[in-house]
Amino acid sequence: MVDVSVTGLRSTKGQVLVCLTANPKAFPDCSKDKASVRMAVKAATSGHFKVAAPADGTYAIAVVHDENSNNKMDMALFMPKEGFGFSRNPAIGMGAPKFKSASFAVTGDTHQSIKMKYML
């Protein structure tokens, strides 16, 4: 079980989309990983929630503050209009961080604190 806390939301509107994957090729968009854990948490209650990892292993988490609840990251000329964050809070350059910089080991219960980032 991964205990997750999200900080830095700019509003309590919408939801936080959560993606937990062990597949580096599927990070940060879990759509290519059938074994990934995907969930939506109301933004108002996203300060603290749990994600069930399928098994012990190495995982990475990506979160999106989906403020308009349309179940996707809205973009404006290649720039995210909504907030995002990753496990281990890696530095953000051009594009999403690599799986390796956001990955962490799950052996029993673990905790990840994720700080949201907003570009626009």
Image: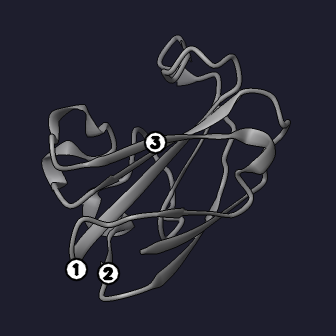
Q: Earlier in the sequence, mark 2 or mark 1?
A: 1
Contact (CB < 8 A) between labels 2 and 3? no
Q: Earlier in the sequence, mark 2 or mark 3?
A: 3
Mark 2 or 3, which is nearer the eye? Answer: 3
For the residues marked 2 and 3, what is the alpha-carbon distance in whole angstroms?
18 Å
Q: Position of residue 6 (x, y in %)?
A: 68, 59
Q: Position of residue 90 (x, y in %)?
A: 48, 64
Quarter of the rendering occupied by the C terminus: top right
For the residues marked 3 and 1, what is the alpha-carbon distance in whole angstroms?
19 Å
The residue under the point 40% across, 38% down is 95
Q: Secondary structure at mark 1?
A: loop
Q: Is residue 23 above or below residue 68?
A: below
Contact (CB < 8 A) between labels 2 and 1? yes
**Residue at which label 3 appears:** 39
Which amino acid lies under the numbered mark 1 shown in the image of this protein?
A: Asp
Q: Secondary structure at mark 2?
A: strand
The answer to which of 56 and 80 lies nearer the viewer is 56
Q: Position of residue 110 (x, y in %)?
A: 46, 83
Which amino acid lies under the numbered mark 2 shown in the image of this protein?
A: Val
Which amino acid lies under the numbered mark 3 shown in the image of this protein?
A: Met
**Residue at which label 1 appears:** 56
The answer to which of 54 and 33 lies nearer the viewer is 54
Q: Is residue 104 above or below residue 91?
A: below
The residue under the point 81% across, 43% down is 44
Q: Earlier in the sequence, mark 3 or mark 1?
A: 3
**Residue at which label 2 appears:** 106
For the residues marked 2 and 1, what is the alpha-carbon distance in whole angstroms?
5 Å
Q: Position of residue 55 (x, y in %)?
A: 21, 73
The residue under the point 34% across, 62% down is 60
